[in-house]
Image (cartoon, helix red, strand yellow):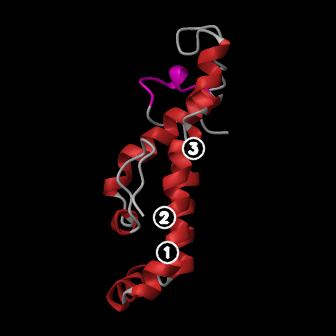
Amino acid sequence: WVGSSLIHLGDSNVPNALMFIDKYSHVEHILNPILATVDALPSLHDKDPHVGAWIDTTFGGVQPLTRAILADFFKYGFDGSGSDNFFDAGSCIDGRLTSAWHWCSQLPAKPFYIVFKLAGFTSFDGQFQT
């Protein structure tokens, strides 16, 4: 397990159950753009021969690119990063969301960021252009 063993509930990070439940509402804002991008990859590849050639040359095709995006998210989106300190990271939903949001903030530095933009990604705040 990566991250601290601390579970937050009733402390300064998650002071009550409503805050705990609210954290789950963030999951869709993180996952929807990732899933929309992965779903759009085959059509992006086939629609424009230049984009398709770039995907093939840079990533080895749609399937390796899909794996690269998902592997990067699952490797770094839950690694305990993004918190001010190790104990605030926690191992519950609070800590995992901190890591996931940190991954989101690092997306522009990822080699596949342009694919997100081509798929209509604008932000992780629930907006997505198709």
Kind of residue at badge 3: Glu
Q: Which residue is mark 3?
A: 28
Kind of residue at badge 2: Thr
Residue 1, position in %: x, y? Answer: 67, 39
Residue 63 lies in quadrant: bottom right
Identity of the residue drawn at 35% across and 69% down:
118
Q: Does the residue at mark 1 contact the one at mark 2 (Cβ under 8 Å)?
A: yes
In the picture, measured across the screen, residue 23 lies left or right of residue 7, that is left
Q: Nearer the viewer, residue 120 or 1?
A: 120
Q: Nearer the viewer, residue 73 or 128?
A: 128
Quadrant including the C terminus: bottom left
Residue 57 lies in quadrant: bottom left
Residue 46, position in %: x, y? Answer: 46, 87
In the picture, measured across the screen, residue 76 lies left or right of residue 106, that is right
Residue 37, position in %: x, y? Answer: 48, 64
Query: What range of the chain is rendered magenta?
Result: 83-90
Mark number for residue 41?
A: 1
Say what secondary structure mark 2 lies in. Answer: helix
Identity of the residue drawn at 51% across and 49% down:
76
Q: Between marks 1 and 3, how big is the CA–CA gap? A: 20 Å
Mark number for residue 12?
A: none
Residue 13, position in %: x, y? Answer: 53, 15
Disc 2: CA contacts within 10 A as few (<14), some (14-19) or many (>=20): many
Identity of the residue drawn at 51% across and 45% down:
30
Disc 3: CA contacts within 10 A as few (<14), some (14-19) or many (>=20): some
Say what secondary structure mark 1 lies in. Answer: helix
Q: Which residue is mark 2?
A: 37
